[in-house]
Each structure stands twice: as C-alpha cells, then as structure tokens.
Amino acid sequence: TYQHSIRKPYISELAELDKKHYLHPTTVPKLHVENGPKLTFSEGEGIYVKCLNGESYIDGLSMLWNVNIGHGNKELAETAKAQMSKLAFSSSFAGFSNEPAVHLAEKLSTMAPGDLNSVFFTSGGSESNDTAFKLARFYWKLQGLPDKRKIIALKQSYHGVTIGAQTATAIPAFHLFSGSGMTEVFHATAHVTNCELGDKSDPNYKGCIRDIVEREGADTIAAIIMEPVQGSGGVHMPPDGYLQAVRKLCDEFNILFIADEVICGFGRTGEMFGVDNWGVVPDLMCVAKGISSGYSQLGGVLLKEKIHDTIVQYDEVLAHGFTYSGHPTACAVALKNIEILERNQVVENVKDMEIVLEDGFNYLKEKHPTVTKSRALGLLSAFELYADREEGIPFDQSILSATEVVEECFKRKLILRPLVSNVGRNIVAIAPPLIINKQQVEEIISILDDAISVFEKKYL
Ligand code: PLP
C-alpha cells in the first residue's frame, strides 16, 4: 500500500513559508527569519514529540507547562470529535448555555478547595487573570467600595500578556515590549513571610506586600495576585507558611487573594491545585493550561461564594465575556481530561515521580560542582548553575550557563527551558508531562548529566 513519506524539500519549503508568513510569540524575530523554525512538531505520544524531520524528543517542559496528561491521548481526541460533531460551538452570552460547560463548572466546584463554587470561563491564562482583576474591582464596587482598585503582584511573577496580566507580570522583557500597561499595579518582594506577618525589623520589610498596603492604604487595594509556585519567573518555591501569611494579611486588610493556578493547577505540584499544598483557600482562583492538558484552549476564574453571591444580586448586564467563554468542545475536553487525571491517579504519580526527580538532582549535585539550588514540588522543578556554589558566586553574565546546558540537552533530544534569575540566565526548568514514569525521569537525568559534563569541561 502507498505510504506518503515527508519529502525533504517539503520541510524546507514549510520553513520558508513560516519565516515569511508566521510571526511567532516570545521568539527573537531576527533569528527566526534568519534560521527558520527550530523544530516543526508533527506528532506526539506520551512524553515524546516527533518532528517533521522524523526526530523524536522528550518534552521536558510539557510544551508550555500545560500538556499534563501527555501527548497523543486518543480519548481526548475522541471526546473533541464527538462534541464537535454534536455541537461545536454555542454562545454563553445573554443567558445561553451548553451541557459540557455546566458539567465542567459543577465538576470544578467539587474539586476546588473551600467554597470556590462557581466559575467564569475564558480561553486562557491571561484572560483569566484580567478577568480576576475586573471581578475583584467589580465586587468591591458592588460592596460600595469603588476606590478599592489597586492590584499587588510579586516580583519575578509571570501572569500573561494581555494588558492587565502583562502589567502584573514582573519580567522586564514583557514591559519593554509594549511600554505602558494597566495603572495601579504594584510589585512586592516575593516570599518574605516574616514581613507579611508584620515584622517591621526585618531588613526586607520595605517593599513587601504589607508595606505597600500600609503605604497605599488598604481602602485603595482590590487584590493581591500570586502564583503558588512561581513558574516562568524562575520556579521559585514559597517558604512554608508564606501563603498562609498572605491569606491572613488579606483577611486583616479586607483584600482579595487571587491565586494564579495557571501552571500549578491540575496536578502539577503533586496536589490538584498548588494552594492545596498549604491548605490555603483564595478568593479567586485562575486556571488554564492543565485544565485541558493543552488539548483545547480554555481557562477560567473560580469565585468564592461571597463574591458569587454579591455579583448575582446585580440586576444589569455583567459586561464582560469572551466569544469562547464556555466553549462546548473545550469544556468537554477538559471534563474528559479531569476524568483521566482522576481515574489514572495521575496526581499520585506526580508525588512518586517527585521523589525520583529529587534523587536525580542529588546525583547531579554530587557529580557536578556547578549544580545547585535544585527544587521540586511535584513535577515543577528547576536547578541552577553557579561558578562557585560554596561561595555563592554565579557565572559571569556573559556565560549563558542554562542556555548552554539546555542546548546540549537539545542535541540529545531533550527539550527543556532556560530561565533568567537575578544573576543571569542560569536556571534550568524541568516540568515533564505528569504521566511520566521512573525510567523516563532517569533518562532525563542521564541526558542532563551528559549535558552538564560538556558545559563544565568548557568552563571549569
Ligand atoms: N499565569 C501563569 C502562571 C502562566 O504561567 C501563564 C502562561 O505561561 C499565564 C498566566 C498566561 O497564560 P496564557 O498564555 O494562556 O494567556
């Protein structure tokens, strides 16, 4: 029987079309039009992705921290097909509804902590965060406190790229791109628990959340937003007690706590939601990515009952919403994704694989003097590369240590991501699909071992 094999010229033709017609997000445009796409993916299975050139790679970052269930899941594909064939799209504006959206809303309320019992659907993480800011302001307005409008985010945070979310994002490149964003957003020092508990003698007090609240006045502040574990800003773990301290502070000053669970949600950290690691219930909880494992574009903001109950008293139009809010196919896929997460005990697997990963990090640290500051919560993990880890001396900024190690991994068919810290591009992030097994984690560690050896040979 005839089998079509992909012609080499087709791959280069496609690359030319890509360079000419396709402007890529978060890519260096000049390099892209010079070199063409780095890889053009065509298939995926489990933790592996295959490219047009026939090469197979381990997806060490679940693409964009989102393919939690792994690639090539046929059940999700069948679910999408069935829903699309039945009702591909329906409006959720003006009181219209659809079955998958209602079922998903109910399912989320049973999974989410506390009384986060209703949801406003969006099509992704940025839209969810912008929606949360608007809902927070709207809530305070309905409470007769329209001056509570300001938002506090943390340094090193990533919340997305729509104007509101981008303003809350604290990674400088995203601000350089478009200049001014939303007004009334402040960035506080991250993870200074004692300061948030009120210890003014702590040298980090100036610039902590509490300091900003006292300076600006709680009656002007709508909400504090944070990722339970910071992702793109460097995989920074909060110290134990930090989220609880912020929750307490929010209660003390009558400020809403928004948890950005876009990466942490749906099992990534070894609990269903990141906040579950510390038993904290936020007032608004933003989700996206892992809700559908990336198989459909979906996000949402979960609301605590007190916020929901206030908003449902409003007797005019709630003038907010996206065409794809409550998209039936996206919601059907998310429901099936959650069913698979639960049925296959994927979150339990994450906890088991965290141990294998941490053992792997210990092995790397023993063998390689540059490896330091390894951390993992579930399968959200990273380590750093330092010139002298005992003395805490980073590599010179001219040495892009993480980029070099990631490039060496890439040559060995493992995709990872270098992240920028305050001492340079020296953080290597690892966040594979949550269905990964022990041998596959070990394979990632072995590739890292070889890659770091090459790097150390060059620079030590
Ligand atoms: N919030 C966090 C924590 C994220 O990591 C991201 C994306 O990486 C976003 C928000 C933005 O989500 P999206 O790209 O779907 O708009």
Image (cartoon, helix red, strand yellow):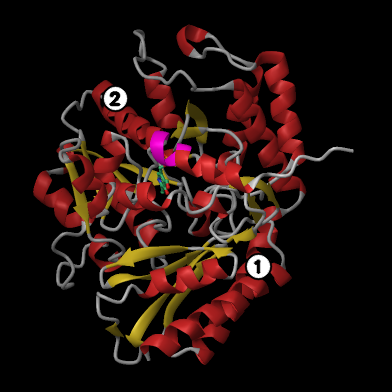
Q: Nearer the viewer, residue 242 or 272?
A: 272
Identify the image quadrant of the N terminus.
top right
Residue depth check, mark 1 versus mark 2: number of the one nearer the observer: 1
Q: Image height check: is 40 above or below 270?
A: above
Mark 1 — residue?
A: 353
Residue in view at x 46 percent, y 45 percent: 262
Specify the farthest residue to the left.
215
Q: Residue furthest front?
A: 9
Residue located beneath label 2 in the image: 138
Q: Sort mark 2 into few (<14), some (14-19) or many (20+) by Cα contacts within 10 Å.
A: many
* Magenta highlight: main SS: helix
Q: Is residue 158 left or right of residue 43?
A: left
Q: Secondary structure at mark 1?
A: helix
Quarter of the C terminus within the rendering: bottom left
Residue 24 percent coordinates (x, y): 39, 41
Task: Quadrant for residue 395, please give it.
Answer: bottom left
On screen, residue 156 versus residue 335, left or right, reads: left
Residue type beneath disc 2: Phe
Q: Which residue: 30% across, 34% down?
A: 133
Q: Say if mark 1 contacts mark 2, CB within 8 Å.
A: no
50 or 441, which is in the foreground? 50
Q: Amino acid at mark 1?
A: Met
Q: Position of residue 137 (x, y in %)?
A: 26, 29
Reply yes or no: does residue 80 show up in magenta. Answer: no
